[in-house]
Amino acid sequence: MISLQQLEQAINRARASSPSRGTDAQLDPEVSVLAGIYGQMIYYRLKTLALSALSPRELEAWQRWSLPRVQQIQSPPYPEDRGSDKP
């Protein structure tokens, strides 16, 4: 389950890492995905949302940004980002 508060925290982490850019303040694609979930939760007045309700893209963005930054650095989402010390 995702709470609205947890989603807000994930959005804030993602925005801090990838701020809006350009003259039109375009959101980073992952921030936009998270904001879409947030908008739906607000519209439908949901306090929580089941992970099973997310699309694969939404789930990936949620998983990436739901962890505190320290954990994100320690556990990169892609194997090639883990360093060259592993074969």
Image: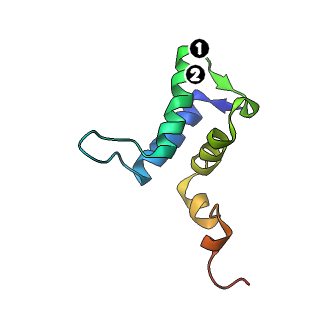
Residue 14: give its label. none
Most extreme residue toward the top is 44
Q: What residue type is labelled 2?
A: Met
Marks 2 and 1: in contact by CB < 8 Å? yes
| 44 versus 73 height, above or below | above
Badge 2 is on which residue?
41
Residue 5 location (% of width, % of height): 55, 31
Label 1 CA crowd tier, 10 Å (few <14, some 14–19, many 20+): few
Residue 50 location (% of width, % of height): 73, 29
The image quarter containing residue 77 is bottom right
Residue 61 location (% of width, % of height): 59, 45
Label 2 CA crowd tier, 10 Å (few <14, some 14–19, many 20+): some
Q: Residue at x 47, y 38 (%)?
A: 32
Q: Which residue is drawn at 71% across and 83% down?
A: 86
Callout 2: helix, strand or loop? Answer: helix
Q: Residue at x 57, y 48 (%)?
A: 65
